[in-house]
Amino acid sequence: MRRGRFTGAAMAAGFVFLWLPILLLVGYAFSADRIPFQWGGFSLRWFAALAGNERIVEAAGLSLRIAAGAATLAVLLGGAAGWALARFGRFRGRALFGMLIGAPLVLPEVVTGLSLLLVFVALEGATGWPQGRGALTVLLAHATLGAAFVAVVVQARLAETDRSLEEAAMDLGATPFTAFRTITLPLIAPALGAGWLLAFTLSLDDVVIASFVSGPAGTTLPMALFAMLRRGLTPEVNALGAVVVLGVGAMLALATLLLRPRPRGE
Amino acid sequence: MTGAGPAALLRARGITKAFGAVVALDALDLDIAPGEFFALLGGSGSGKSTLLRIIAGFEAPDAGRVLLDGADIVATPPWARPINMMFQSYALFPHLSVADNVAYGLRRGGVAKAEAARRVADALAMVGLAGLDRRRPHQLSGGQQQRVALARSLVMRPRLLLLDEPLGALDAGLRERTGFELRALQRQTGAAFVMVTHDQEEALALADRVAVLDGGRVAQVGSPRAIYERPASRFVARFLGAANVFEGRAMGGGFDSAVAGITFAGAIGGDSLAVAIRPERIRIAPGASGANSATGIVEDTAFRGDDTLLVLRLSGAATLRVLHAEQDGAPPARGDTVTVGWDAADVVALAS
Amino acid sequence: MLAPVWAWLLVLVAAPAAALVVIALAEADSGIPPFRLALSPTGFATLVEDAYYLDAVLTALRVAVTTSACCLLVAYPMAIGIARAAPRRRVLLLVLLMLPFWTGFLLRVGAWIGLLRDEGWINRLLMAAGITDAPLPLLYSEGAMLVGMVHAYLPFAVLPLFAALLRLDPALGEAAADLGARPATIFFTVTLPVTAPDAAAGFLLVFIPAAGEFVIPELMGPPEAQLVGRVLWQEFFQNRDWPVAAALAVALLALLLVPIRLFQRLGARA
């Protein structure tokens, strides 16, 4: 099988390309040398330096809070939207609704960021809210972005769920609300969980939209990291990379567990 | 309408339903008697599933009334109707155990826990699934899933149980046995069963009465034997058991089919548009001539076990399907010229 | 029931789109915020008159097309390999594919900077091996920018291809082999044509965000690589010319409308 061998080699090369920079980033986090990506003996000094870097620690705390809030809001909004798109049939304005909920998926970040900022400025001018820009505006922007992804995940999950399950529940005496609570919700719970994690990660990863809609008091972790990278690389970046890669690895393992396909019976 | 009389459990009157420009049901009338096994038989697009969903409450008719014990239930939501449905996909809740699936409706109805547990156990025993109550649906075979769905509906003690293609998802080998079990359960519970199917053998074998649906209307309703032997229209004659149907003209108590070159004799009204003759009623009759006979060349044969299907090419463009029973001796071979005949009593005149 | 969602979408998706157009038609001003509402074509006129902006758009399109094409080239064997793997191994490979995507885009850019810069890992390796005496100027080049973008967007190209290959009936390839096709011929006559729409979806999935990319050109590209996203950023943050930035956003959106519609139609098909 010559083609099998070629495909295998090309696939392996692809994975090396994907992983080499990440593995080196994480590996050199444990180097004592002050030049990044240069081995100077094993040391945890850069983790200590990172922990002592108030700017980064503060930004990380803010980012985690924003991401958790945005992901929660995104699950509520996107969950309702995905349910409506999958189950409400041709309700009024469905085409517009679908376009609006999905728009953040396909808009370039610079466009989303700039346009949201313009609306926040206009809103504040007209109503006084939101007062200034910072964590709240970033949270609103990230929830909008996350909701788009959650809606897609939930809609897909519902599309592959037999619709007659809800009808069967109603046939057996459940009101629509009870049918939703006892049948639909348990069935889409893994999708909601995965959607939350997705929205959370998107928020933690965004620098462009946040830069537009944030203010002086709202420096998120990616914004701080972006500033660091602009000035030049330091081994603290390696340390941060190690922390994030290990943390995200754990989270992804959790998500795979949640979304693992149920074993099929005979 | 061969009605179930004043004692009807369920009456549908003038049910009309359109999806966009497609008319699914067209002023349909139907009566279901208490405790009968009723089959709605039709091809895809005949409106049979829509009718079932209207009775269950998942669709609202555009016009018409659905009366249960004389009371209109069109405005009653599905969860408040004393009618239950077994879904074609079974719709078993994948996240609940077998016992919890069966108990689901009892919980909603507020049945006490101990009482519910007892009824669930009874229902599972009734369908032969005792001991499987802790399993999840995906751990069951297709036949077992079908029984869970059945138990889940029957545990509600419905007066009317709707079954959407109940045998459709089963292997051929399992169908016959499950069909008998369905009939037994129906007799045991005394509930009226209304089954939707596209399989005429299934409908004829299981039901007390069959309604043949065509284009959103009832083409014919009656006992399986009546419908099979006395089809009321060309559609029913062709749909049930592939009868030979010839169009032509009624004249002087007989019927002339120019295309086949056959003259039919029998009880044929002057308004007849066509006649039907079943393949198994035709026999080889050398020397027969005149009315109720035909001569043709055997174009094809198919051995089917206890009989052989012959396709006769008649003098015209028409063909005649003949079932030659094994006990009548060796069937003719391809290319043979054969003369066949039939009794006047077996000729069915069709006025529509 | 849906009213809160509608309200949210109108305020935070529909209104921003409208605001873009309104501000694009406003006039730049030195106040706070730095514009005066008007119906002025100044913003758009600037885009047309100054070749700098047209150049930015063309550069962005060229880079986005190159990125998408490179992604597909790398993605095809990976998608085939993953789709062919036994189920357990397949899950592992998918995790390996997605994990980098979830580890933070900026950190991956940081890693590439660490590899590519003059005193970086690759240059040290090359010099130690005696291949070169002086460090090669790898970073801040168009090549570095492309490597960074392909690395960032590769999973987007692999996933639709993988899904398509998983759906692909293996009997098709077997039938082709039975009819005398060699493996390479099977790929070009069966696999490629059947999965072409999904390849197109993957292409667009990379192309659409890449066309507006700001971070990677800024951190890894050469100074002269003025992509539209970077120019928009500068107009907004450095020049404080909101109308021109908004006009650029509207122009970028208009350009992307066709690819976006195409992508949605391909998505609906799958």
Image (tube, coloured by chain):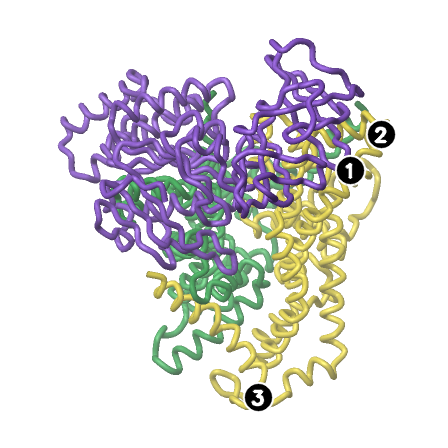
Chain colours: A green, B purple, C yellow
Question: Which quadrant is the N terminus of chain C positioned in?
Answer: bottom left
Q: Is residue C169 left or right of residue A109?
A: right
Q: Which amino acid, mark 1?
A: Val
Q: Which residue is mark 2?
A: C181
Q: Is residue A219 left or right of residue B34?
A: right
Evaluate whether residue B230 shows in this view: yes
Q: Residue at x 71, y 43 (%)?
A: C195
Q: Amino acid at mark 3?
A: Glu
Q: Position of residue B140 (x, y in %)?
A: 41, 22
Check disc 1 and report its element: helix, strand or loop.
helix
The chain to which mark 1 is attached is C
Residue C192, given in percent of the width and then of the height, sits at 76, 41
C88 left or right of A263 in image? right
Disc 1 to disc 2, how far (Cα)? Answer: 10 Å
Circle 3 residue: C27
- Say what amino acid the circle numbered 2 marks: Ala
Which residue position is annotated with label 1? C190
Q: Residue at x 30, y 42 (%)?
A: A171
Q: Given this view, does label 3 or label 1 mark the residue nearer the observer?
A: 1
- Note whether residue C114 is visible: no
Q: Nearer the viewer, residue C4 or B144?
A: B144
